[in-house]
Image (tube, helix red, strand yellow):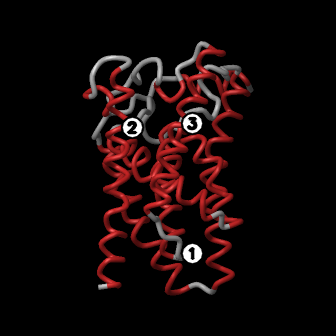
Amino acid sequence: MRDVVHQYMTGPNPFILFGLDHIIGTIVFLGLWIWLPTYSKNNLTKPRQEQLGIVLGLIVMSNYLTWVGLEAIAGTFDSKLHLPFHLCRFANLAIPFVMIWKKERLFQVLYFWGMSGMLQGVITPDVTHGFPHFHYFRFLIGHTGMVLVLIYAIVVFDFRPTLKGLWDSFLALNVFLVFAAIVNLVLDSNYFWICGKPPTASLLDYLGPWPWYILVAEFVALLHYLVAYAPFYFFNKRIHS
């Protein structure tokens, strides 16, 4: 079994940036972002809304855990590569706490992380395999699926991003950065792309050489945060005017 899983996980099936499977996958999830939360809000009972939200959160979390399990079965699990010290993976593990226990402060952190890093990941995916490989779905669910869950929390559970939440999230981002840097020193790894840029095309390619792109990325992340908060700022201002 190990040989079969190993061959499947490492066999060639290249992902093409802005190829057909990239575009179709993105369009499908864009539709889900709009349709699923709206459908749940308008057509499901409160208990059903709660159940669907929990299922969505658990799917996103299980997506990462399934990947780790498959790597372990294949004998390719590597502590330098597969631990949850990339932002998206940690967020995937944390999102059920929002959907099950309605942790408001955690939602604030994950919302701004999700609407910056996850959306950027949709545009320039760090994925090596295309449709219909597991890695293709793993990346889509871990990023676009994460955004879907956050939108669901806003539309159905009435969570709202706040300015305080923005700064809390930015602080949490930097705490995570420091923690990931320590992990990298211990494991000689490159989590959170602190020690080098991703092997695939990404926004970091345009932010200068190491280590300066890390500093520039801080400002880019803050700009993304402000953009993610802007619709709620103007909506609140309109209500209170």
Eye-nearest disc, 1 or 2: 1
For marks 1 and 3, give the CA distance. Answer: 27 Å
Secondary structure found at label 2 = loop
Tell me the tag on residue 122: none
Crowdedness of circle 2 by 10 Å Cα count: few (<14), some, many (20+)? many
Mark 2 or mark 3, which is nearer the start of the sequence? 2
User: Seen in the image, is 61 located left or right of residue 88?
Assistant: right
Where residue 80 sits: x, y (%)? 62, 19
User: Seen in the image, is 12 located left or right of residue 205?
Assistant: right
- Name the residue tied to disc 2: 125
The type of residue carrying mark 2 is Pro
The type of residue carrying mark 3 is Phe
Looking at the rendering, in which quadrant would you find the C terminus?
Answer: bottom left
Q: Residue at x 34, y 52 (%)?
A: 24
For marks 1 and 2, give the CA distance. Answer: 29 Å
Crowdedness of circle 1 by 10 Å Cα count: few (<14), some, many (20+)? some
Where residue 6 sits: x, y (%)? 64, 23
Q: Residue at x 38, y 33 (%)?
A: 15
- Name the residue tied to disc 1: 157
